[in-house]
Image (cartoon, rainbow, N blue to C red):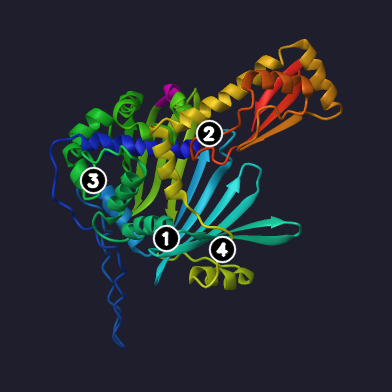
Amino acid sequence: MKTIKLVLLVVLVGALLAGCGKGTSENDPTPTPAATATPTQQAQKDETPTPTPTEEPQRLEGTVFERMYSALHNTFAEKNCTVDSAITGMSSSDETSQTKQIRFVEEENGEMLFVADTFDDGSKQNKYVFLSDKGGVDMATWWGEGKMNYDYMKVSEEDASFMYSIIHGLREPGDAAFQNLVRLFASVFPDWPTNLISDQSSLLGLLAPFSSEEYLQKTFSYHRLEDGTDVFIIKSQTIVNFLQYTDKDFRSFRYYVGEQTFNMLPMLGDIEFAVSYNGVYLDKITLRCIVADKAAEWKITFSNIGTTTYNLPTSAQEKFEAIKNGSMAGDGVTDEVSWLREYQQDALAGRVDQDVAMLREIANAYREIVKDPEIVEAVKKAIGAQDAWRIVYEEDSRYDVCDIPEIDQKLKERFGDAKIKSASVWLRPAYVVIYLVPENGGISVYFD
């Protein structure tokens, strides 16, 4: 998730900086019509065929942002398309998905997404997601015990309607997709800066004061390659400026991205953002940057425009359709939006920090306790031939549940009869695992 959140940060940098501008524009040009082939003129009988004049390929017109905006709409207006996402040069313990393919297929009463993930170890997972403004269904396939297995989740009406409205809005002229995205942000982030960007904002209007090539060249080193690719350089200082803004007026976004990600930003170099086109459609969006002297690239490729298909496994069709039409319940219900909304409220109220402090106190207690040589020997004796000693803390459990008497006595002295109580949705219900591992002659403490 770290890379995705980092890219979202970059996107919001541009949006929020644009929102600080004084001027707006009411111009909202409709997308350039999609190219249509001219039928070859039929030759009259017994006559020499008349050559069809070569039709000049359509081109995107307008400012840089207008071209990008039109290409995005044109691509999704063709009803179906495939988007391939590949990340190279970036890896971390919580980022295992390196390549993702999403096929967007418009259906009569909703949007269908086929999602194919390929992970670092070569394993794969497919998902089939149907979305409408009334709900949806999310089915994941996975191979295990010699057969294909299926997990079905009902998508809540709120989750589905937000995602559906954004995706479907991309197919329509105007600002529906952007305005629904802003509506989602404003719903989730309690301190979303509605004074800068509201759900009635025009995206091109917000960007209009900054759309001249002179401004873009000066601020973002904008240039256009011979093949028509638009290239921008987002300076690392721009990210720093945004950090200063979020620290004062948009703290909920900092919680969303995570302090670990923000700690990475000083290692982040300039970001090259490039958009290339295939006629009036999007071709590729590429982000390149240096993170801690390591090159990273995220490339998004658009293909199969107007022709994307998917195959729902035959054995899963009946249940998938039953959940989709509401005649059967899934294995659970998603609540991503409501959970994130509650998390942000908890974060701003200090309840997330309260949970973090509780976990830090537990960790520090164990690290202090295992410094005692007698405790080290007691732990090693308890572990025996095992690799580690595992301790599980759950909501309402006491602190002295290690089951190594020497440690439990120390925990009892420090925490008394207190119990683990989560303060935020982030940790609720609490489930924390601690491992005591013999290393370098002592005992190391690990959290999971």
Labels 1 and 3: the sequence-earlier one = 1
Foreground label between 4 and 3: 4
Q: Is residue 272 visible?
A: no
Task: State the extent of the magenta-drawn residues as a range.
Answer: 265-269
Q: What is the CA distance from the residue labelled 4 to the residue labelled 3? A: 35 Å
Asked whether the residues under the numbered discs 2 and 3 touch, taking CB atoms below 8 Å apart as contact, a structural biologist would say no
Q: Is residue 213 visible?
A: yes
Query: Which residue is denoted by mark 2 in the rendering?
Result: 90
Q: Residue at x 48, y 47 (%)?
A: 85
Query: Which residue is denoted by mark 4 in the rendering?
Result: 330
Labels 2 and 3: the sequence-earlier one = 2
Is residue 204 within the magenta segment?
A: no
The percent coordinates of residue 200 (x first, y second) are: 21, 50
Question: Total of numbered circles in the picture?
Answer: 4
Labels 2 and 4: the sequence-earlier one = 2
Mark 4 element type: loop
Asked whether the residues under the numbered discs 1 and 3 touch, taking CB atoms below 8 Å apart as contact, a structural biologist would say no
Residue type beneath disc 3:
Ser
| Location of residue 151 by image quarter | bottom right
Labels 1 and 4: the sequence-earlier one = 1
Q: Is residue 164 left or right of residue 359?
A: left
Residue 157: give its label: 1
Q: Residue at x 57, y 41 (%)?
A: 429
Residue type beneath disc 2:
Met
Q: What is the CA distance from the residue labelled 1 to the residue labelled 4? A: 14 Å
Q: Is residue 217 left or right of residue 123?
A: left
Q: Is residue 193 above or below residue 130?
A: above
Q: Is residue 194 left or right of residue 327?
A: left
